[in-house]
Structure formats: structure tokens, C-alpha cells
Image: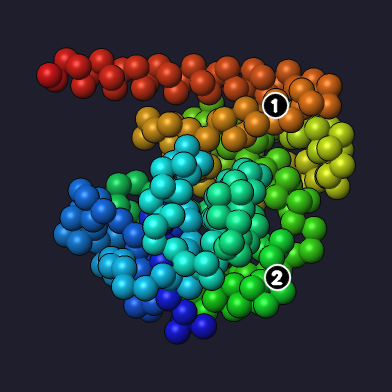
Amino acid sequence: MNEKQVVLLGVGAVGGALLCRKPENTEHIFVMVSGERKERMKRDGIFFNDRQYFPQIWQQTTAPDYLLIAVKNPQLEEAIIQIKEMIGAQTVLVPLMNGISAAEILRERFPQNPVVTVAVYVDAQKRGNRITCTGSYVVEIGDAEPFVLEETAALLESFGISGRICEDMRRKQWKKWMVNIGSNQVSAILRATYGEISRTPEAKALILAAMEEVVAVAQAAGVRLYQEDAVHTVERIPTWGEYGKSSMLQDVEAERKTEVEVFSGTLMEIAARYGVQTPVNQTLYWLLRATEMLYLQKQHCNQYADK
């Protein structure tokens, strides 16, 4: 599979952990980056589990066979503008993103391209250009032609990633989304690691309550998601690592724009269509939006003061 030309857009925790999962990956994956980020990557590279890598920068000669999109959801529209001139009709688009809408959006914008629906499970953390990931990396895939899924799974396996072809990707995506809505949002508000949450009954109760609302909305929408899925998730929190941090907690700590709109924001929109109440997620949404706006306003004031 390594003869396929593979381009990665987005070298955050998820993208960077894939890129550097095996040392030889950087010989077969090109990174799409420009401007200051490009110069910084050429100069400083990426540290993955304390080993330094210098990725190959994408310089287009032909359309890639695969485009792995690992940006955060607020950056998806910008990414679409970037990629629309560089992909071919046969380029397979693989969005390694949170939420339940990225693949659907890409299918609407690029109807000629194969798009793979994905659910990603990886405990990766990034600070500056340093990424740590010591656990497993699993990517569940579906909703594409069988030969596309088989090639995608083989490609992921060649990069040291467990690629699992799944039939009911709607359930898979909603289940992962449920986990994100509960654990990511609560951990970000509490500024707590998974280990700290696992020792705090009130935090686990809040996560369960948020996920139970996802289950209620899913069932109203005809998605096979159940109460036991939420309970089992809470029971597994102690296995996620003492010092593990959710991606949203990492965003809040770095004072970046979060993905709250694709978590509780989107959940509330879907819930409204079916008349389902989501008071827990409404509260989490307000808290996260307020937290985000406070530090973004502070950044704006600091930039203005510097001028």
C-alpha cells in the first residue's frame, strides 16, 4: 500500500500521532502545510514520544491518491478551500475528525470523490511541536465502496494504525460522539485529567448525564445507541490513563477555539428537531462558550495593546 501517494492535512495530536506512529511513515506520508508553519516544520520538525522527525512537505505534481484530513472542525471550511484545487476525482478523502458531520460535508462539497466515514480512537497529546502517544490507535471506517474500505484499512495498517471496517458506521460515529460530548466537555470545564475524573464520582455522574442525553437524541433519530453504552463508557474511564487529557481540555489549556459547536451545539440542534430536552448539554455549552470567549477576548485585548 505504500506506493499510494498519501497527503496529510493537519499535524495536531491526531494527525501527528498517525504521521509518526512508525518511523518509516514520514517516508511515505507528505504533509500539506504552508507559510510560517511550513518554515517552522522544516526548521524544528516534530517530536513524537521524544524522537524528532522531519516530515516531507507536499509539493504538488499530481493529485494524491489519499488525503487524510486531521484538522479541527472549526478549520474544516478553510481546509475545503485549500484542497479543492489539489485533489483529483479519484482522491480518497479520509476525515480523521471528531463529530458526526465531517464526512457528510465532504460528500456534499466533493460528490465525485470517495469519502470514508471514520471514528478515531487515540489518546494523543500535543504541546507545541511535541506529541505523545503511548497507547493504541484505532480507526473505524465505513460508508464507502468495499474496495475503497479494504485499501484504506490496509493503508492504515501499513502505518501502524488498526483499521477496522464496520457496517453500522452511524452507530460507531454516534457512540464516539457520545464519548466526546461527555468526557471532552466535562474534562475541559473541570481542567481534569482522566485519572482525576476517575476518582471523582460527581465528575463521572456529570459525564454520564451528558451522554444519556446523547442516547435519548440518538434513539429519537433512529440510531442504535443505548443506555448501557453510556454506562460502559463511564466504567472504562480509569483505563484511559492517569495523565490522559481530552482534546478539548488541551484546546482550553492552550486557549484555542474549541469544538463545542460540533459537540453540545450540534446535539442541541438535532434534539430540537425531535423535541428532546438536553438541559445538561445546554449548561455545558454555555460554560464552554463563556470560557472560550473570555480567553479569546483577552487575546484580542492583548493584541490591541501590543499595537
Q: What colour-coding does the image apply?
A: rainbow
- Element type where label 1 sits in the image: helix
Q: Residue at x 20, y 17 (%)?
A: 304
Q: Disc 1 and disc 2: Cα gap in Å?
A: 30 Å
Q: Residue at x 30, y 56 (%)?
A: 33
Q: Residue 131, how many percent across, how many down?
A: 38, 55
**Marks 1 and 2: which is nearer the front?**
2
User: Is residue 220 shown to the viewer in this render?
Assistant: yes
Q: Is residue 209 above or below residue 294?
A: below
Q: Residue 209, how many percent across, how many down?
A: 75, 28
Near mark 2 (Cα within 10 A), the count class, few <14, some 14-19 or many ≥20, is few
User: What is the three-letter code of the residue carrying label 2?
Assistant: Glu
* Numbered mark located on residue 269 in the image: 1
Near mark 1 (Cα within 10 A), the count class, few <14, some 14-19 or many ≥20, is few
Of 60 and 153, the residue lying toward us: 60
User: Is residue 236 shown to the viewer in this render?
Assistant: no
User: What is the three-letter code of the residue carrying label 1?
Assistant: Glu
Q: Residue furthest left?
A: 307
* Numbered mark located on residue 116 in the image: none
Residue under circle 2?
145
Of 196 and 285, the residue lying toward us: 285
Count up the numbered dots: 2
Q: Is residue 208 left or right of residue 284?
A: right
Q: Residue 39, how many percent across, how many down?
A: 18, 55
- Element type where label 2 sits in the image: loop
Q: Is residue 122 left or right of residue 6?
A: right
Q: Is residue 35 above or below residue 201?
A: below
Of 261 and 105, the residue lying toward us: 105
